[in-house]
Amino acid sequence: MGHHVLLVEDEQNIVEAMRFLLSREGWRVDTHSDGATALDTIRANGPDLVVLDYMLPGRSGLEILSDLRALPEYSDLPVLMLTARGQARDREQAEKAGVSRFMTKPFSNTEVLNAVRDLMRAKLQ
Amino acid sequence: MASQGLTGSRIRERRLMRGIRQAELAREIGISASYLNLIEHNRRRIGGKLLLDIAEMLGVAPQMLTQGAEAALVASLREAGEAAGLSRTEADRVEDFAGRFPGWAETLSTGHRRIASLERTIETLSDRMAHDPQLAASLYELLSTAAAIRSTAAILAETKDLDRSQQDRFHENMDQDSARLSDSAKRLVQFLDAEPTETAASSPTEEVEAFLSDNNYFFPELEGGEVGIEAVLETSERSMSADAKKMAGKILQQIVKDGKTLPTASLRKVVSNTGIDPLQLAQSLSVPVSLVLRRLANIPEYGLGLVVCDRSGSLVFRKPIEGFNIPRFGAACPLWPLFQALTMPGQILARQMTQLGRDSAVFDVFAVSETVVETQYNMPPLVFGSMLICPSGSALSDLHGQNMEIVGPTCRVCPRKGCNARREPSILTENFAM
């Protein structure tokens, strides 16, 4: 089994599509849809990479990311943020919070796969 | 120079526009050319039959040559000059300019009015774009659904070895998402098609404000106990959501409570003797100043505005008044006395104030904070700030002589430069420095 990706996203059909794509690449994919408990799930599962939605029920992806980066053991965990909020200030906020890659919806499958591959490659180097 | 003294300049301008020589006009109206010359240089006053004759000869209405016809134009030009930051020397020549170049003056005035109108539209749209939850939610939902469809469609198109059950599953997802996309797009179009007017309520807060505005913020039958709150809400011609009704009900409860403590008739009687002096009214009626502010704003004939905020500074009640911009969403200008009152419980602020922007109207404002004690253990008291906004110099209120405070509406549409209280750049000013 390949590397472990945790997909935190509340749009069920996006989850299904992403799970299919990433699984075909050989990655183990876990999913989570609730913002309020996402940080606990990340800590419990210890993924190699997190795909994180910006707008989640309970807690925003931005808050989750900020808290995650405050934990020393997750300071360099690759996080790909997916969002419908494509304004410059949203991107800036995500970058300030420590996002590894920021991608706006609607994205292409190839873009997501390339981003995940790049992040994983960078992590392994 | 006084405006009425410029009739001569306007006569001269109109005469030259029509290509009539001074001597010719003088002859036609039966005066000497030298006398007409004195008139045209505003060194002789003119009126009566002579004015009517000259107006007839020049083919204009007599009032076009007098002050009244151009007073509004001059006022509009003054506003345009102030907005452009003209020097005092230049600004003082506005009447001369209007008299000598009426065509250009009208063009400038029309342009200024047009800018003001567009700024109003920008403010409204900016408010909605930046803070309207329905618009933002619709757009984000649209994009998320599009993302799901795009991703699923690509899987179906590009994956050759997809088994039948997976194909069915993804087709089903696309079917659901396309229906969602269609609904989201329809809602968005409906929203965008609505004119950004006061009546286009798109959130519970706006629905409540529209309901209150329909009733002129005045509910005498409720105060008199003839009908109940439920009945007022149910019989309203405006259809409101359940959330809006809940919010409106709370406001009506406050109005009923206030009306019992300080009935409209009693307040009207005292105001007719004393005018609007909240402190004096509160003392003579033995009621809190905050209550007086709310009650004064409820009485329609006074035409007063009111804003109420909670301890966080969020505006929880707005009764608008012409010439004073109260943001519908987001935070107001922190320089408003309302927020100063919030930090100084017990102090009653009375200030003369003008708001930067289009109209530059002057207001007398009275602000105070009020603590509402909770009836539960360990619950902090609720604190509310209230600010009454009265047109300055009216028969009811005149704080003339106070230091004029200059405030803004909200940072996003405020042109003030070098303001320490600024939170974000203004969209109305280019190259704005924070």
Image: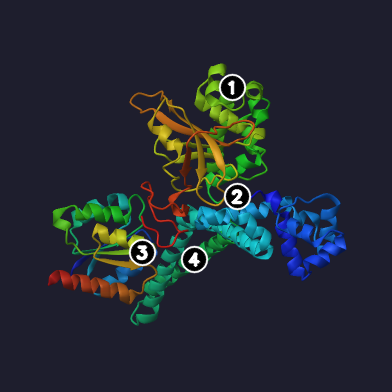
Residue occupied by mark 1? B262
Disc 3: CA contacts within 10 A as few (<14), some (14-19) or many (>=20):
few
Query: Which of the chains bears the disc numbered 3?
Result: A
Q: CA distance from mark 2 to mark 1?
A: 30 Å
The image position of residue B212, as x and y in percent, is 61, 39
The amino acid type of the residue labelled 3 equals Ala
Residue at image point 83% right, 67% down: B24
For the residue pair B433 and B386, the one nearer the viewer reads as B433
Tell me if label 4 and label 3 are in contact, CB under 8 Å. no
Q: Which circle marks residue B181 in the picture? A: 4
Q: Are marks 1 and 4 on the same chain?
A: yes
Discs 2, 1: same chain: yes
Instruction: State the residue position of label 2.
Output: B198
Q: Amino acid at mark 4?
A: Leu
**Could you give the CA–CA distance between mark 1 and mark 4, rounded to whole angstroms?**
53 Å
Give the residue number, with chain letter if any, for mark 3. Answer: A88
